[in-house]
Amino acid sequence: MLYNKVKFFKALGDETRLTILSYLLEHSYCACDFSSLTKKDQTTVSKHLKVLVEADILKYEKKGRNIIYSIKNREIECLLRSLGIRDVKPCCDRQQASWLCFLVVAENRAGNLIDEEIEDRAESEAKDKSKVNLQAKKK
């Protein structure tokens, strides 16, 4: 059990892997897409994807010649979001950082807050519905 947690956190200890995860928090991607997104060669990207799969963070599905990667499950997705990994994507060259980067980060944070509010409301509504169902069953 502890070994799995160590493997999980070690997998998060790399900038390229965090960037990959930040994109996957939006939607699934083909393995071939990450080369351009991370500006790394395909061999390097494949090694990083393998680490993330072995850490039980990602799952993959073969579709013809393509391999489509996605976050393994909703629980891991929520954990990654709570760690702020969604905001890791580089928005520009580090040496050319500008007010635009600040605006993108601020927009992402606002989006995260809205997403969290929506999730909280959905959970609250689900709890309310289950209470109503329990009360109806008791009658």
Image (cartoon, grey):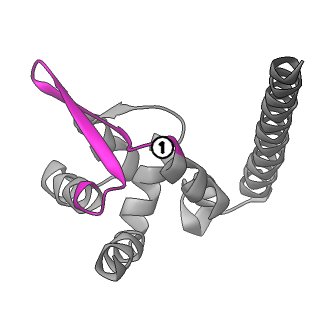
Question: Is residue 61 part of the magenta span, yes or no?
Answer: yes
Q: Which amino acid does label 1 sit on?
A: Tyr
Residue 123 lies, in percent from the top left, at: 78, 37
Residue, far front:
139
Question: Which image quarter is the N terminus in?
Answer: bottom left
Residue 107 lies in quadrant: top right
Residue 44 lies, in percent from the top left, at: 19, 59
- Can the viewer see residue 84? yes
- Seen at 54% across and 36% down, the residue is 26
> With respect to residue 54, does 20 lie above or below?
above
Question: Which image quarter is the C terminus in?
Answer: top right
Query: Across the whole image, how many numbered discs are drawn on residues?
Result: 1
Q: Mark 1 points at which residue?
A: 23
Residue, far left:
65
- Seen at 42% across and 68% down, the residue is 15
Residue 2 lies, in percent from the top left, at: 35, 81
- Seen at 81% across and 27% down, the residue is 134
Residue 70 lies in quadrant: top left
- Can the viewer see residue 91? no
* Crowding near the residue tagged with mark 1, few <14, some 14–19, many ≥20 C-alpha atoms within 10 Å: many
Q: What stretch is highlighted in magenta?
A: 53-74
Q: Nearer the viewer, residue 23 or 9?
A: 9
Q: Is mark 1 on a helix, strand or loop?
A: helix
Residue 95 lies, in percent from the top left, at: 57, 68
Whether residue 12 sits left or right of residue 132 in the image: it is: left
> With respect to residue 43, does 31 lie above or below?
above
Whether residue 47 sits left or right of residue 9 in the image: it is: left
Question: Is residue 33 part of the magenta span, yes or no?
Answer: no
- Seen at 17% across and 48% down, the residue is 42
